[in-house]
Image (cartoon, grey):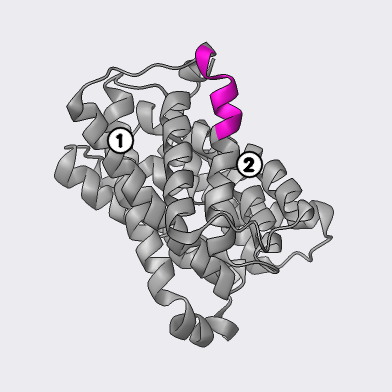
Amino acid sequence: MLENINYVYLAILSAFFASISNVLVKSILSTVSSKDILGINFMIMGVILLLFSPLFFQLKFSFFVIGILISIIVIDTFANYYYFRALEKAEASIVTPLLSLAPVFTFIFAWLFLDDKVSFFNFFIAIIIMMVTIAFSTDFSKFKFFLSQTLFPAILSSVLFGLSAIPSKYLLSNEMINVLTLYEIRAISIGFIAFFIFGTGRKVLKVEHYKKLFIRSFFVMGKWFFLYYALKKGSAGLTMTLANITPIFVFILSLIFLQEKFTLKKILAIISIVILIYIIN
């Protein structure tokens, strides 16, 4: 069914699921450190997929494919570690702007390694979407603290996530692996690596933490499933741009569930992004 959906809509769905997972992980990181949850976070998702693996597993085995898979796993392990580090040290509203820069690096890497070029017009529109997203989500009153505390992990996470999209798109576009199999292998491998480096976190994690991580895992899997399908079908740079409009959905969810107040800045940003997405599509 997803094969027939425009990659633009798949990328936007990825952003929606990401917004929920970002909010959920922030509540968890208020009581434990990123090192404590990194391994179990991925292992929960990997085990869920492993249970259903016979229904979807598809992999064209070769040393070349395994090499690319290993590169994805290593890149994403460090990308997620620095992502959690950034969220751990600052509020999501402060960290999100630099985490939203991943598409910039995806455009660069896609042009270098995949010959994945887009028109100058679409590239220009994508840059405007990123700028609007950053302006929308940046809390300038706390920006000085952000620069001193979380600049390095947030930037590095963006670079690594931007890079990770390239080998992932290559495998998916060339039918060497399917979306579910890629995420299953990725999740289990990152979980084992995190266990080995940082430990299992069982001494500090409580039942409440495991419950929250289990619930969050479905939103994280949704985020990556839609992102991988979008990467398979469309431009890597445009896909990553649209998948990083998460602050828009965070604000909409806050309006619905937390009665957050409207502001002219946020309303104009949402209208602008909707118009720009329509133009790209």
112, above or below 255, in the image:
above
Residue 18 marker: none
Q: What number of labels is visible? A: 2
Residue identified by numbered label 1: 69
Nearer to us in this view, 266 or 279: 266
Q: Residue at x 71, y 62 (%)?
A: 27
Q: In this rendering, does residue 136 appear at all?
A: no
Coordinates of residue 216 in the picture (x, y in percent): 67, 45
Q: Which residues are magenta?
A: 47-54
- Residue 12: image location, x then y, percent: 54, 39
- Is the residue 49 above or below the residue 29 in the image? above
Label 2: how many residues lie within 10 Å, few (<14), some (14-19) or many (20+)?
many
Amino acid at pointer 2 = Ser
**The N terminus - image quarter:** top right
> Disc 1 on helix, strand or loop?
helix
Q: Closer to the camera, 72 or 18? A: 72
Q: Which mark is residue 217?
A: 2
Residue 87 appears at what percent x and percent y?
A: 56, 67
Instruction: Name the residue nearer the viewer: 176 or 139.
Output: 176
What is the quadrant of residue 222 in the picture? Answer: top right
Residue sitting at x 42%, y 40%: 189
- Mark-to-mark CA distance, 1 and 2: 21 Å
Q: Magenta segment, principal secondary structure?
A: helix
* Few, some or many residues within 10 Å of mark 1 (<14, 14–19, 20+): many
Left of 99 or right of it: where is 93?
right
Against 266, residue 256 (above or below) is above
Quarter of the image with the C terminus in it = top left
